[in-house]
Image (tube, rainbow, N blue to C red):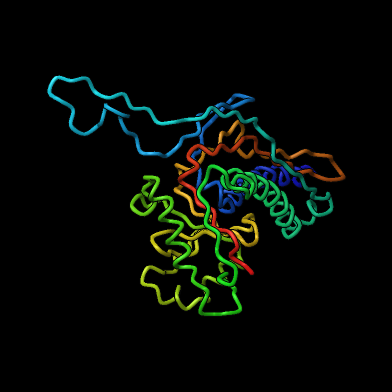
């Protein structure tokens, strides 16, 4: 019996590594924001506006006379506050499965617990960046009725032009969406299928398959393309990663194994943090992608 418990203890340490390792590959939206440690309950930040700075009337940036004072310039910001949230879940591995080394049972619990936490965190980040799909500060581009990516009129489907128009909105706000190497398009699985099956996309010289971890699947129009189920049906999101927002992390994904001898082990995982939309005009939400 001692050997069995010893083996179970070893496995409990592996569960911690497996859950964290699996979660790291599953996060999609979290990869798009800056991660910053925080020990505060309420986190304050300044949300930027993206208007290019000028010196104001009579104090132009261009043409400062010799020996004259420099114009004072200051980017507009708005003070915001956000409160941390706990994301967590737990699952059970029964004693009989421990004794018989039921790897499938362990894997299922790991996947279920991990997906619960990852999906919750990614969903919150998506909702924050899109202002809950009701854009106010971020850029937005609505595809006209009859021109959706699954329009009954095939010739009206033009995701390439829609994406380029959204990029133009972000670029007009002076964010280097195309030159920084940090521009991303995020869509859900059905919309990605529509993109991938579109002749205008497949024949576009910028399109290339680029399958890696964390949802990266391809490149298009100078953007890396990610796929995530947290993206609302009918929407697509373009962001300048690591600029658009911040994930203030109070506790990284943490795993605890709660032992109830002769009955079960409970695997519990949680993460604590809050997402902040810091640069709204480095984001563009494309709406009405589906009819």
Q: Quadrant of the N terminus?
A: top right
Horizontal side of 168 relative to 289 (left or right) equals left
Determine the residue located farthest toward the front in the rendered image: 58
Residue at 41 percent of width and 69 percent of height: 207
Residue at 56 percent of width and 45 percent of height: 129
Q: Quadrant of the C terminus?
A: bottom right
Counting from the top left corner in percent of width and height, residue 144 is at: 56, 66
Q: Which picture quadrant has residue 234?
A: bottom right
Determine the residue located farthest toward the left in the rendered image: 66
Query: Residue 149 versus residue 203: which sits nearer the camera?
Result: 149
Counting from the top left corner in percent of width and height, residue 266 is at: 78, 43
Query: Residue 237 versus residue 67: which sits nearer the camera?
Result: 67
Question: Where 160 sits versus 70, above or below?
Answer: below
Query: Residue 156 versus residue 40: which sits nearer the camera?
Result: 156
Counting from the top left corner in percent of width and height, residue 61 is at: 25, 31
Residue at 73 percent of width and 60 percent of height: 104
Counting from the top left corner in percent of width and height, residue 286 is at: 54, 58
Counting the numbered discs, the total is 0
Horizontal side of 228 relative to 12 (left or right) equals left
Residue at 67 percent of width and 44 percent of height: 10
Horizontal side of 162 relative to 265 (left or right) equals left
């Amino acid at each position: 019996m001692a050997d069995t418990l010893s083996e179970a203890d070893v496995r409990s340490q592996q569960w911690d590594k497996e859950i964290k390792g699996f979660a790291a590959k599953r996060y999609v939206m979290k990869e798009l924001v800056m991660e910053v440690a925080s020990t505060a309950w309420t986190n304050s930040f300044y949300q930027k506006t993206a208007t290019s700075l000028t010196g104001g009337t009579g104090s132009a940036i261009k043409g400062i006379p010799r020996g004259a004072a420099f114009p004072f310039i200051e980017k507009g910001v708005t003070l915001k506050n956000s409160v941390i949230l706990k994301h967590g879940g737990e699952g059970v591995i029964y004693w009989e499965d421990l004794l018989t080394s039921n790897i499938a049972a362990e894997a299922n619990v790991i996947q279920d617990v991990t997906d619960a936490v990852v999906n919750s965190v990614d969903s919150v980040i998506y909702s924050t960046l899109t202002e809950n799909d009701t854009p106010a500060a971020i850029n937005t581009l609505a595809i006209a009725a009859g021109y959706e990516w699954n329009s009954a009129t095939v010739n009206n489907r033009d995701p390439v032009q829609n994406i380029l128009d959204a990029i133009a909105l972000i670029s007009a706000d002076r964010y280097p969406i195309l030159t920084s190497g940090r521009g991303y398009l995020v869509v859900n699985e059905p919309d990605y299928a529509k993109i991938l099956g579109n002749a205008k996309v497949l024949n576009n010289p910028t399109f290339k398959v680029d399958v890696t971890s964390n949802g990266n699947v391809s490149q298009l129009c100078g953007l890396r393309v990610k796929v995530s189920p947290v993206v609302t049906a009918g929407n697509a999101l373009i962001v300048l990663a690591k600029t658009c927002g911040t994930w203030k992390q109070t506790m990284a994904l943490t795993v605890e194994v709660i032992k109830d001898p002769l009955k079960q082990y409970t695997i519990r995982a949680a993460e604590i943090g809050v997402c902040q939309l810091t640069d709204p005009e480095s984001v563009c939400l494309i709406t009405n992608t589906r009819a």
